[in-house]
Image (tube, grey):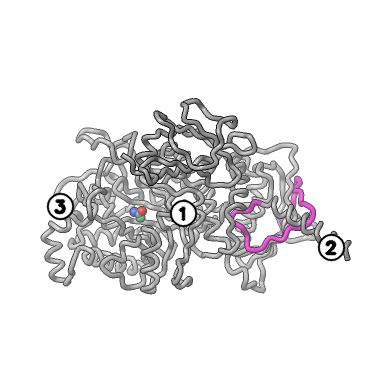
Amino acid sequence: MKKILLFNLCLLFVASSWAQELSIIPQPVLVQSQPGSFILKNNFTVGVSSNDEVTARVVNYITKKLSVSTGFAFSTGKIEKNSIFRFHLSRLKNSELGTEGYQLNVYPDSVSITANQPAGLFYAVQTFLQLLPKEIESKDPVKNFSWSAPCVRITDYPRFAWRGLMLDVSRHFFTKDQVKQFIDEMVRYKYNRFHWHLTDDEGWRIEIKSLPKLTQVGAWRVPRVGRWAEFSPPTPDEPRNYGGFYTQEEIKEVVQYAKDNFVEVLPEIDMPGHSLAFIASYPEICGTPGTYQVNSGERLIDWTLPGHPAVVNNTIDPSNEKAYELIDKVMGEVANLFPFEYIHMGGDECSKNFWEKNESIAKLMKKEKLQDMNEVQSYFVKRMEKIIESKKKKMIGWDEILEGGLKGNAAVMSWRGSKGGIEAAKLGHQVVMSPNDFAYLDLRQGDALTEPPIYSSVRLNQSYRFEPVPEGVDPKLILGGQGNLWSERLTTWRSVQYMVYPRALSIAETLWSPKESKNWDSFVRKTENHFKRLDVSETKYSTALYDCVFEPQKDDHGKLQIELSTEISGLDIFYTFDETNPDQFYPKYVAPLSVPKDAVTLKVVTYRNRKQIGKQINMPIDELKKRAGIK
Ligand code: ACM
């Protein structure tokens, strides 16, 4: 009996140590570690049970990927006894796996993948790649290397059908190839919706053949470098040579590329606010006569005043029938280019101050019995839905489309927290959750002192707390969620990646993995392993999770008290007020700090196992006082 117990204990120990070695993001539904490992060798064979074109693409994907870094040759054919990779599309559908689930068995001598649909095979491939050493992400062959993967049985399927990332290409234009790279990177973590924010005040990025000025005029602005929203306005003679757009051929290419990677593309045409690029091209759609120019990052909205009035009228006039004619043309061409069932009409942050002075809108209100500006906006939204549905598409919009009443079948993307999503679901609308307090990727990941300037933050641990289904809401109405990356402050591709990673890993886990399997400590360990993979693939990411977090407070006597912490456990914080640079031989933080008389700076640094891991942060005491509300 004792022996059996000991044997079982040993098994448990061995099984758990195998389990610990796996760093799969998002966490699969069921992982059963097995003894042994599989080693990929040259001239490997791939067997496929079906000869459909989509499965062939998945096979092509993995063979190409494996051969880049291993340099190995391979052959493909029917499943034979000696096939190393076996791809099965099951005839008898496994209802547990659904359309995107899979079973992956890694044996010492082969790898077997089963799914109902090719998408499942594709996600199994993504999981398998994560079982291989990080060197698999190398862009060049790695010689004399053992390509081993632990033996394992995995059953996996997603929690949500909609697992999205949004990229804003209006504020800064990113090329077709960069967009494809974005898609390459997102599918590694099983994202399947690419939301393409194609138009805004700063640029119109999609060719509309019937309205050529949209890209002749609307795609270009003057270049500016520095701090967004503080730029000087363009002068009349300044060349407008910064920007770009995608031709319809390029759009088709990206849509096909996404489809080949099992990604649907959601196009967004943002209206009736955020429309300055449209208005600069066709000023007749604006209710304020004049000539307009595409915004270059100079102040456009006064965010400090109630109602957020626009400084320049960047809104479409909802009482103008000509505007609807133009929008109909835009939507017709958009609908033909994008096979996805939804078109996003924007609807967010529409200033109403110019509408309030517009006589034609006053007449419309009388005629349509509209009580206020929210109802005017709602009138516009209804007209949008009619146009979009006339193109055989469904409409989705930001949560402002609820204002003034939302009827019909529109889906709502909740961004001002989860509030709009809850309200929409209560009205029976479908919802995609992208709350700014958890899923906004343009916000800071670390302290304001060390990060690019922006008004707020979402640290990694905050993004990991994202829960798309609020209490009391029918989960069937929550299609899923997404992370949104606005690009006002992102001028380079490296800065795009920096904002996306590692938070996209966390959102991926929320959207794919069972809620009960989420575990912050385990996620952090896995993320650290993925940092090494991102290093090999030369993808930039933020390491702010290692940095010190400052929590300054005013105590009962009005004095500054400073609490320090870290997002992840196991780090030590060392600090000093004496202006020298701290290391592990300095005082270790154990309890809230009071500031010594005359101290000017609190310098901190984090260590793990006697090695520096976080950045040194030199925090001015005055800044901490300001944050604590001490004058
Ligand atoms: C948004 O962030 N304005 C949707």
549 or 227: which is nearer to us? Answer: 549
Distance from disc 3 to disc 2, alpha carbons, whole Å, reads 82 Å
Tell me the amino acid under the disc marked 1. Leu
Expressed as whole percent of the image width and height from the top left, the position of residue 393 reads 38, 67
* Extent of the magenta region: 23-48
Q: Is mark 1 within 8 Å of ligand 1?
A: no
**Left or right: residue 102 compared with residue 296:** right
Q: Position of residue 156 (x, y in %)?
A: 63, 63
Q: Whereabouts is ligand 1, in terms of quadrant?
A: bottom left
40 falls in the magenta region: yes
Checking the image for residue 288, the label placed there is 3
> Which of the two discs, 1 and 2, sits closer to the camera?
2
Return the residue at label 2.
5
Label number found at residue 165: 1
**Label 3: element kind:** loop
Residue 177 in the magenta stretch? The answer is no
- Vertical placement of residue 321 versus 592, above or below: below
Q: Residues within 10 Å of mark 2 (few under 14, many from 20)?
A: few
Q: Position of residue 631 (x, y in %)?
A: 31, 39
